[in-house]
Image (tube, helix red, strand yellow):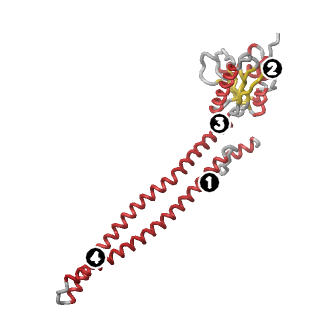
Amino acid sequence: MEFDLYDKMTKRNDIHWYCGSCEPKVMQCIKLEREIERKLADFMGKVEYKIKTLEGSVYKKIAEMEEKISERFRDHINERLKNLVTYTAVEEAIQKVNDNAMSYADKARVDIKEDLTVNFAQDMKENIKTEITGDLQEAQSLLQETRLQVKEQLDKEARRNNIIINRAPESTKTTVEEKIRDDQEYVMELFNEVLEADCNVDDIKKMFRLGARGEYSRPLLIECKSRQVKNLIIESAGRLRGAPQKFKGISVTHDMTIAERAQCKDAVAEAKAKTAADTSGEWKFVVRGPPGEMKVFKVKIRPQQY
């Protein structure tokens, strides 16, 4: 992708795109969120059906209870009122009993329904929480991982044209302008005379020292205007082996992210350990590869020429 096109696309708020490694994670998050919504809708449908079923059962049980209570009270009253004279008195007594029975049944219906509603609502809450907690935790973990990957990619993009020169001597001049000029002259001589990269001042966007001044020379960060210039300089770094004395001991490296530096450090430690463990004296282990993908290789030691 051309740089101009990249800049135009990143300025648009209505366009979202991701790198090859991040896009599957983002799409997985979206699919997982839709699956959670579908499961929740299905579960709520089952819950609603179960509530209606239980409510029907409750009404049926209450109706049966009312019938039994009514029959028992009617039989009891009939037995107690056999000797009463008037049929009207008996009917009034039966009606009173029926009213009392209905009042009791209504109260029982309300109490039972309230108990069932509270208990069932609590069960629903626990079931829903248990079922979706796992999916939510997985989605959150995946989202966090995706955010870290996006952050790492943005950091890489910001450093893509940068070069770090380690152990380059610092100027002893007094003014900032003189120090900058000395660093610039040192770098241009290194690039053109030693590395033969054919660079000029216009190929460099900015240059500055990293950190506070102390006992040792600070690393020198150089941002090139294009990736082509940066890559040419990195590919020519092997010529430092035959450099003049003023350039001895320096190194020219990529400007790596924190994760890339950690991976590089581990690879260097592995190479040193393998070299120390080799008892033949004919092999050494070196680290090669781009930032974040560095690997340890076994190479034969060249015999010294006398």
Q: Nearer the viewer, residue 40 or 89?
A: 89
Q: Determine contact: label 2, label 3, CB under 8 Å.
A: no
Which dot marks residue 155? 3
Give the residue number, with chain letter if any, for mark 1.
31
Q: Label 4 to label 1, Cα distance in Å? A: 57 Å
Label 2 CA crowd tier, 10 Å (few <14, some 14–19, many 20+): few
The image shows residue 202 at horizontal and vertical percentages of 76, 29
Which dot marks residue 77? none
Nearer the observer: mark 2 or 3; the answer is 3
For the residue marked with disc 4, what is the amino acid? Answer: Ala
Nearer the observer: mark 3 or 4; the answer is 4
Q: Earlier in the sequence, mark 3 or mark 1?
A: 1
**In the figure, residue 177 lies in which quadrant?**
top right
Q: Label 3 to label 1, Cα distance in Å? A: 28 Å
Q: Earlier in the sequence, mark 2 or mark 4?
A: 4
For the residue marked with disc 3, what is the amino acid? Answer: Asp
